[in-house]
Amino acid sequence: MDTQAQQYWRANLRLVAVLLTIWFICSYLFGILLVDQLNTIKVGGAGLGFWFAQQGSIYTFLVLIFIYVIRMNALDKKFGVHED
Amino acid sequence: MDLQILTYTVVGITFALYIGIAFWARAHSTSEFYAAGRGIHPIANGMATAADWMSAASFISMAGLIAFNGYGASVFLMGWTGGYVLLALLLAPYLRKFGKFTVPEFIGDRYYSKSARFVAVVCLILASITYVIGQMKGIGVAFSRFLETSYDTGLYIGMGIVFIYSVLGGMKGITYTQIAQYVVLIFAYTVPAVFISMHLTGNPVPQLGLLDNMTGSTVPMLDKLDQVVTDLGFKQYTTQVMGNTLNMFVYTLTLMIGTAGLPHVIIRFFTVPKVKDARSSAGWALVFIAILYTTAPAVGSMARLNLMNTIQVGEVGSPDGNLAYADRPQWFKNWEATGLLKYQDKNGDGRIQYYDDKNKAFAAKAETFGWKGNEMVKVDRDIMVLANPEIAKLPDWVIALVVAGGLAAALSTAAGLLLAIASSISHDLVKGMINPNISEKAELLTSRITMTGAILAAGYLGLHPPDFAAGTVAIAFGLAAASIFPALMMGIFNKRMNRAGAIAGMVAGIGITLLYVFQHKGIMFVPGTAFLGDMKPNWFLGISPNAFGAVGALVNFIVAILVSRITMPPPEHIQHLVEDIRVPAGAGGATTH
């Protein structure tokens, strides 16, 4: 039987793993490794790979952090470890 | 009003504002000096972090690098923003929960060792000093243009201003001043971008103008740029890579990890009231950073297009296709005066030929036009952002504003870094190890003396910077990535990590990175001390020295884990400490010093 603290920590690690996977995909995969393939698709005047490398990855990073903030605040409440 | 007077006025007003705020909010205690008494709201903290973060490298240098490296410069865009994800998810909330003032303090307590704390202080100082050199380069460029003097004189004056400004204030003053500086710098960065985007594409939003067609045509701006540069033998803008794909991957990773390991950024998360605020502070910081970072690709590409069109006024190869030197615009003359832009009439025709003479196929073709080599013998990339509004013929007040913005960016970061250096020496080294009974007053004095020493050292090294401002800063990130980040992360996520592992890891990580950087760039970047020369054929798998930090970080992780497995696990109370920092509850109590 896990303690509350262990369950809280495990849930935290799961969330971080999911978010960091997306972090990797939008920057390293779309922006660098698959850039040539994605550039065949156009966003306005730019290739999609170029767009991800210079714009899209940054927007994604922002969304990731705020999802983390919201989900963690919920987790803190659920496990009763939030600050007063 | 004359441009020079206007520039003095705008810069003067902004400086008066910063100094006024610094005076109004000056620090009275060590807690206020290092961590602003932990009373800063997350949005305010995010804005100050953004100003602290966006240095001369971001404001002055980055768009210039984008202009000349095109797609390849994406490493800076992704690298300097993606690190905030790591910071928010892996470090900030836990370090805030731990509740101390400095990074070495955490490392010393977590690894129950003064030696670990000492190693962290050394790593931190190496990374921060390198970073300040990059700022000094940016400050030198901005002041040389602003006062129309040489780069060296500009640098000396900049050192003086940084001294007055950062030695007085401390963290509390710095935080409020940085909020003002953020407003100045973001305004200064976006206003010219909006004007130029409007002019070239008819779209007032630079982020969209980047993707739009040229005004009155169906050709996308980026296609037009690709064509203009390739017509002169340069690499295609949207596809040119920096080194190779592996180098870009590693470079980006280095900048991201370095972001999360740089002491002056981490310190910011000690200044918020709660753990929850530490998380959202990182998000707010990135919001404010992203405004500049998503604008930069538009600034870079449009500046390049305008620059090419200014010099190559007609068809490539036609007798009057190139701008006559006698007709060069005023901005050209101004930058020639600083020595950062140089022209040499190689074929004696009195016109300016600007093309890629290292591209053999194109150089052969150029010879048939009577061209005898690229005549723009020096175009320092760091001048692009400052020259950009002049190249685009924007009104004088915009030009003055950009100079003020560049100075705000460089000063705010230099101040933050100097504070990190000063606190690591006075708080970690002197109070933590040499003389624990030092009075608050003496500790503050030590801080201020340290800052002065750091300004002098960085100024001296800034006379011969190892690279453009952004390149120098990238090396600093490499050093932080290879040493601080792994030690912090394993301190939180690996309960089994112990003293021996952490120390061995930090020493191995920073050691291999320093070796690689110094062998190519010179010992502490002093010219002539590079023992392998800055030669690409000697680069390991084509990884540039600026990008090597991620490899150092990997070495750090591996060495630390191996050593910790064969040595004693950390004592019981340390394992409890780690469990404690993993939950937010009770952070208030931990703040007492």
Image: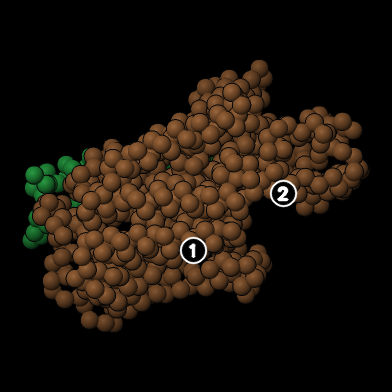
Q: Earlier in the sequence, mark 1 or mark 2?
A: 2
Quarter occupied by residue B173: top left
Foreground residue, B278 or B55? B55
Q: Residue at x 55, y 29 (%)?
A: B6
Q: Decide: few, some or many residues near mark 2? Use Cα within 10 Å; few <14, some 14-19, many ≥20.
A: some
Q: Amino acid at mark 2?
A: Lys
The residue that disc 1 covers is B457
Q: Name the tint of chain A in the rendering.
A: green
Quarter occupied by residue B435: bottom left
Q: Which mark is residue B9?
A: none
Tell me: B530 left or right of B234.
left
Q: Residue at x 23, y 39 (%)?
A: B41
Q: Residue B143: x, y in percent?
A: 56, 44
Q: Which mark is residue B378?
A: 2
Q: Residue B573: x, y in percent?
A: 13, 71
Q: Decide: few, some or many residues near mark 1? Use Cα within 10 Å; few <14, some 14-19, many ≥20.
A: some
Tell me: B379 left or right of B348.
left
Find numbered disc 2 in the image and state the secondary structure of the residue it sits on.
strand
The N terminus of chain B is located in which quarter?
Answer: top right
Q: Residue at x 58, y 49 (%)?
A: B154
Q: Which chain is brown?
A: B
Foreground residue, B544 or B338? B338
